[in-house]
Amino acid sequence: MRRILRWAAWLIGILAVALIVAAIATARSGDDTLYPPAPDATRVEVFVVANFHHSGIILPREALAEAARREALPALAAVTERFAGYERLEFGWGDEAFYTRVPTTNALTTALALRALFRPGNPSVLHVVGLHQHPRLAYLSASMVAVTLGEDGFARLAAMLDATFARSGTDGTIEELGRGLYGPSLFFRAVGTFNVFRVCNHWVADLLDAAGVPTAPLVATLPQGLLWDLTARTGAVRLSPGAR
């Protein structure tokens, strides 16, 4: 019995070391010409919000609309117009079946989770929510960090976000899929397939990577891992409930 326990301890240790090495090897250092922003740069504050099984990113609508005009981003131009009047927009990406059927963790089932993670070719959607309140007040129970980007980094993030919206037909319009899960929200058809190697947190990390922010894809596999990495390596500020 002791021999089995020793072997198990060795195996756990080897796996732990392998994961640490893999996390370090795959970590992305970011782009120091974009992040942190120069002292004289125009700054844009964005928020990463997470719960037990999902993360999303909250962006200022007017800054998005301006980036859409300046960089010719038609999907974002349409979305910011669709949600005109809201101060910020929350964006989330995920498996279509899972996302549309699991509004809360209470609706989470093993079958849906396994299907989303391991079935190949799962189509994806974007979920967009209009926010009037400060994000910390809108999502009181969620974990949240604030990241300050420069204008150039934000423009690159916006371009990647724009490219996530699937286009339909020959005119390239975005495809609206109906009402979202909560608040003033809508689902849109997205590009990319969802699986265990490409989850919502990886998508958020990729947006931040485009903005020059250091990220670690392996650590970002879990929502709290994404937030931990952002606070540990980038100086992102974790917001406590009620903070603004």
Image (cartoon, rainbow, N blue to C red):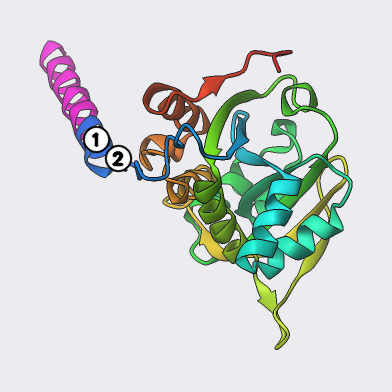
Magenta part of the chain: 1-18
Label 2 with label 1: CB-CB less than 8 Å: yes
- Residue 166 is situated, as x and y percent measured from the top left of the image, at 65, 70
In the picture, measured across the screen, residue 152 lies left or right of residue 16, that is: right
Which residue is the site of mark 1? 24
Instruction: Reply above or below: 68 against 30.
Output: below
Question: Residue 27: which numbered mark, if any?
Answer: 2
Q: How many marks?
A: 2
Looking at the image, which is closer to me, 164 or 61?
Answer: 61
Residues packed near mark 1 inside 10 Å, few (<14), some (14 to 19) or many (20 plus): some
Magenta-drawn stretch, dominant element (helix, strand or loop) = helix
Residue at 28% x, 36% y is 23
- Residue 228 is situated, as x and y percent measured from the top left of the image, at 45, 24
Instruction: Reply above or below: 183 against 207.
Output: above
Which image quadrant: the N terminus? top left
Q: Let me know if residue 113 is in the magenta part.
A: no
Q: Element at badge 2?
A: loop
The quarter holding residue 8 reads top left
Residue at 37% x, 27% y is 233
Give the amino acid type for the residue marked by disc 2 in the picture. Ala
The answer to whether residue 123 shows anywhere in this view is no
The answer to whether residue 85 shows anywhere in this view is yes
Residues packed near mark 2 inside 10 Å, few (<14), some (14 to 19) or many (20 plus): some
Residue at 45% x, 51% y is 210
